Image: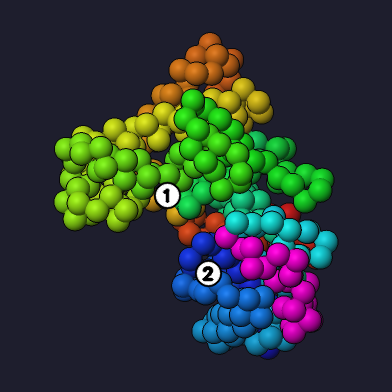
Amino acid sequence: MNVKQCFVGVDFGKTNVRFGISEGEPALTYYAKFPYTRVSPENITRQIVEGIALALKEVGHTTDELLGIGISVPAVVDRKTGAIIWGPDWDFMAGASPARPIADRYRVPVVADVDTVIPTWGENWAGVGKTCKRFAVLTWGTGLGAGLVIDGQVQEYPNNLFPEFGHSRVSDDDWPCKCGARGCVDTMVCGSGIANHGKLAVREGRKTVLTELSRNNADKVTAAMVFAAADKGDEVARAILDRVAVLLGRLCANVVLTMQPEKIVIVGGLEERCAPVLATINRTMRENCWFLFKGLTTCEVVASGLGDKAGVLGAIRKVQRNIGGSNR
C-alpha cells in the first residue's frame, strides 16, 4: 500500500488562522479557517496542535506521514530559531518561537516567517510564479505587505528582513503608522485605513450612506461598510476607494521604477474586493512611471487567484524547499 506523505501550512492573520495540507503538489487537499485568540505562547502552541490534528484527521493522514510544517505569522521572525522579533499584533509572543515547540512535538522540520514573505512563496509556487519569473507581491488586508520574486527566487534579506515598500510615502498625509513612522502608504490604504477615511467622512458630516450604515457613529465605520457603500453608488465611498487606488498606483509606479517586475500581484484579505479599483491602480501606475508610458517596459497589476490560500501554500512551499523538495 502506498503511503501518502504530506506537509501542513499554518497561516496566522490578525484575527483568523488558516490550515492547509498538501501532498507535495501546488494544491491543497485540505483547507480551513478559524478565529483564534492571542493570549500567550502556550495558547498559540495549543491552537496550532489542535488545528493540525483536525486537518490530519479530516484528510485521513497520520502524524507519521507528516514531512514538515510551515508557519506564517504577522511579525518579524528570526529565521534560524523561529523566535518572534517584533510585531505590533504579536507583541505577546516577543522572544518566543511558535516553531520550536511544534518541531519538538512532531519531530519534523518546522519553519516560520513573516506573513509578507510566506504568501510570496505561495504565489511563486502555485500562482503567478507558474508563468512569470519576475514579479512583486502586495499583501493587502489589515496591513500592506510586500514581496519580490527575481529570476524565480523569493527574495529574503539579511538580518531576517524582507521587502517592505508598503511603508513608503506616496502622499503628504502624515497619519501615524503602526510601524512607528508617519504617512506610510500602509496606514492609508489597509483595511483600518479605509475605515479611517470613512470615519472622517461621517465626522465631517458629508452626505454618505456610511452615516446610515454606522447609525451615525463614526467609530463604528468599517472597511466592509466603505466597500458596501461604494457598491450602492455612494459618491463619498467611491471617492475613498479611488483615493486608495491612486495611492496604490503611485506605489506600484515606484516598484516598477525600482525593479521592473512583469506583474504586481495583489494577495490578502482585500484581494477579493480589488476588482473595482484595479483599473485606477493600473492607470495611475502608468501615468507616474516613465518606463511604462514611454513603452520601455510593461507591467500589470493583477489580483491573485489564490485567495486566502496563498499563506498556507507558501508556508508549505517554504518548508518543502528547506528539506529539499522539488523545484516545481
First-in-chain label (1 vs 2): 2
Mark 1 residue element: helix
Query: Where the C terminus falls, by quadrant?
Result: bottom right
Which residue is more in the foreground, 295 or 167? Answer: 167
Could you say where residue 47 lies in the image, as x and y percent from the top left? Answer: 58, 80
- Farthest residue, direction top: 294
Give the magenta part as a residue range: 89-109
Tag 2: residue type? Answer: Val
Could you say where residue 134 lies in the image, as x and y percent from the top left? Answer: 65, 36
Q: Which disc is residue 276 wearing?
A: none
From the image, tell me which residue sits under label 2: 17
* Residue 181 within the magenta-colored segment of the rendering: no
From the image, tell me which residue sits under label 1: 191
Tag 1: residue type? Answer: Gly
The residue shown at (48%, 37%) is: 175
When the figure is inspected, residue 206 is found, relative to residue 223, above or below; the finding is: above
The residue shown at (67%, 75%) is: 41
> Residue 208 is drawn in which quadrant?
top left
| Of labels 1 and 2, the one closer to you | 1
Which residue is more in the foreground, 38 or 249? Answer: 38
Could you say where residue 231 lies in the image, as x and y percent from the top left? Answer: 22, 45
The residue shown at (58%, 26%) is: 254
The residue shown at (83%, 61%) is: 80
In the rendered structure, the answer to whether residue 61 lies left or right of residue 278 reads right
In the rendered structure, the answer to whether residue 206 lies left or right of residue 11 reads left
Query: Where the N terminus falls, by quadrant?
Result: bottom right
Mark 2 residue element: strand
Which residue is more in the foreground, 143 or 53? Answer: 143
Classed neighbour count for the residue bearing mark 1: other residues with Cα under 10 Å, few (<14), some (14–19), many (≥20): many
Count of labels in the image: 2
Q: Can residue 157 be seen by looking at this rendering?
A: yes
